[in-house]
Amino acid sequence: MIETPYLLFLGDAPDMLAAKVAIGIRDWRPDHAVGQISLPGCGADLGLTEMTLAEARDAGAKTLVIGVANRGGVISPAWKEVLIAALEMGYDIASGLHNLLRDEGDLVAAAQTYGGTLHDVRVPTVGYPIANGVKRKGKRCLAVGTDCSVGKMYTALAMDAVMQERGMKSTFRATGQTGILITGHGVPLDAVIADFMAGSIEYLTPDNDEDHWDLIEGQGSLFHVSYSGVTMALVHGGQPDALILCHEPTRTHMRGLPEYDVPSLEELKAVALPLAQRANPACKVVGISVNTQHLTEDEAVKYLAEVEERMGLPAVDPYRHGAGRLVDALAAV
Amino acid sequence: MIETPYLLFLGDAPDMLAAKVAIGIRDWRPDHAVGQISLPGCGADLGLTEMTLAEARDAGAKTLVIGVANRGGVISPAWKEVLIAALEMGYDIASGLHNLLRDEGDLVAAAQTYGGTLHDVRVPTVGYPIANGVKRKGKRCLAVGTDCSVGKMYTALAMDAVMQERGMKSTFRATGQTGILITGHGVPLDAVIADFMAGSIEYLTPDNDEDHWDLIEGQGSLFHVSYSGVTMALVHGGQPDALILCHEPTRTHMRGLPEYDVPSLEELKAVALPLAQRANPACKVVGISVNTQHLTEDEAVKYLAEVEERMGLPAVDPYRHGAGRLVDALAAV
């Protein structure tokens, strides 16, 4: 559990693309961010108030979140000055970088001296149980994709936001480092030891009110041979009542696997649903989320209508048109 | 890679059941064992020559293998005396216990002083790559089960033994601690970090001669919700050309999951084969291995004949009747 609110550290991010984590926090948990702090030459601007460490601390910030992914994941000397000053002022620091805060001797020393916590969200800190498969109370929705990086996290966050607006009971359950930094907690599933993967997802989505929905962030794809085991643990550990199929229609091959075709939505449904029903016989596919960023608005509308007709399920791009119809479909379960 | 040959340490094993690892080495790699060493009160006897550490060292033993699983996995003080004496004499030590040799300060100190290696085979020591899905040369066979602990390791070892007798090119590829101790190398898949599972299996089963078969030890089951992600990584990382379906017909529910039914062999085939064909479109189910230990000989013969008729595939219990017919089926691929 990372203490909120945050001050978002943009460092010397060359552009907005490098500030993906900070953008996610600003967009999905604006209450978590009191402001931003940049270094000279920073090319990213979130449009939040630029603050010094002291100003943000006075505004209530508890944690400095590294909101930028730099090349190679290195924690540069230019950053160190700010990070150490933050620890001296009583901040915790949270990071999803490959290179860990805990491997930097000067940061560890400062954290020990000033009593701060270094959160490396890529590394599990919980001893997860082995999954027991026991049916849990409450409802769960899992986004599964025809490929990696097709918008599964975005879909779950967008659905959660709509459900909150409508006064429904819902919780976004993060399973990757960006999601964990956005919400302040979750399971870094790709870093969990094999035997405990499904158990970590049971731990993440415990018994809840019968009318509460966990919106579980998907990972990988059952069709992506590098990561399919991770996805399988989500399908069985998550015990989903509802699946949302996610797709990016312009992709010509699986991400990082040039020899592998992207499956159709029909193929994804045919594989994912029976596997999910093993853990929850009542599971249904309730909707389709399409990432249409590489289509024009006209193309997107036409494509979505065609998919909706073909699959007999609501098909939306939550970025363009909102996630309301996916939430309608969940509410009908 | 664990140095062979071994001296097999039976400790104070209460019975033969506790000596499963040592029995596996004796049965499958008799050339790896120069003898056995027991403590007073030991209730297990492999029928090998009982030796002192010095006698076994003179007979060429390089590694003392802890061939016994005691309750709780604790390394008891009674054992320590022998283990430290072995390190002093120049032995390495290998163990598959939950409690690690490397966490015992006195063993670590002795290993450092005398230059020995402590092999904890439950812990990966290789930085495995992320799977790339590129088609590899040579052939691979994977045993998949309707449940955990239905004889997948035994099946692969028995097939490998028949293939060696016949002069075929084959290698048993261990993916669990018992298999690793038997053969001296392998991947402890259940302890690999999620993102690297499939890659560790690609690493374990690299390019080989076109007529060489890797016999990959299976783990878990696609139908076992606690471990299905591990199995999935084997199915995709292993790129099997051939699947052997493994089953134990008297089991009333999934191991450790009282609310989960054991699937039929038909259900296993229907799920496993399309998933395997994602990584290797040519993959086929070639045979069925049934663990009939809880049936009489008559019941076993009748059951196997019925399965063979129903599935249209050779069905054998390799323990009762040998793995020859499964190897025939492989050779026909």
Image (cartoon, coloured by chain):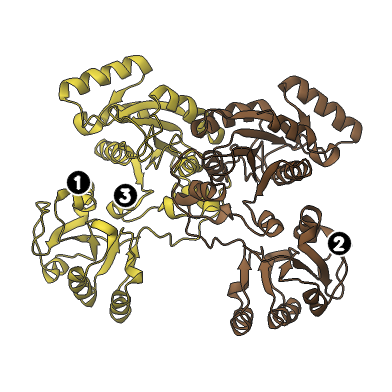
Chain colours: A brown, B yellow
Q: At label 3, which amino acid type do we have?
A: Gly
Q: At label 1, which amino acid type do we have?
A: Asp
Looking at the image, which is closer to me, B183 or B82?
Answer: B82
Q: Earlier in the sequence, mark 1 or mark 3?
A: 1
- Read off the residue under disc 3: B179
CB under 8 Å between discs 1 and 3: no
- Read off the residue under disc 2: A46
Write down the quadrant of residue B60 in the picture. Answer: bottom left
Write down the quadrant of residue A231 in the picture. Answer: top right
Q: Residue at x 73, y 43 (%)?
A: A151
Looking at the image, which is closer to me, A271 or B326?
Answer: A271
Tell me the subunit letter for badge 2.
A
Write down the quadrant of residue B329 in the picture. Answer: top left
Position in image of residue A261 (x %, y %): 66, 34
Q: At label 2, which amino acid type do we have?
A: Leu
Q: Tell me the distance, in whole angstroms, between the alpha carbons under discs 2 and 1.
A: 66 Å
Q: Residue at x 75, y 71 (%)?
A: A61
Callout 3 crowding tier (Cα within 10 Å): few <14, some 14–19, many ≥20: many
Q: Is residue A160 above or below residue B312?
A: below
| Secondary structure type for disc 2 | loop
Tell me the subunit letter for badge 1.
B
Q: Residue at x 31, y 79 (%)?
A: B109
| Secondary structure type for disc 1 | helix
Q: Is residue B302 above or below residue B152?
A: above
Q: Tell me the distance, in whole angstroms, between the alpha carbons under discs 1 and 3.
A: 12 Å
Position in image of residue B75 (x %, y %): 25, 66
Quarter holding the N terminus of chain B is bottom left
Q: Is residue B137 above or below residue B197?
A: above
- Read off the residue under disc 1: B27
Position in image of residue A101 (x %, y %): 63, 72
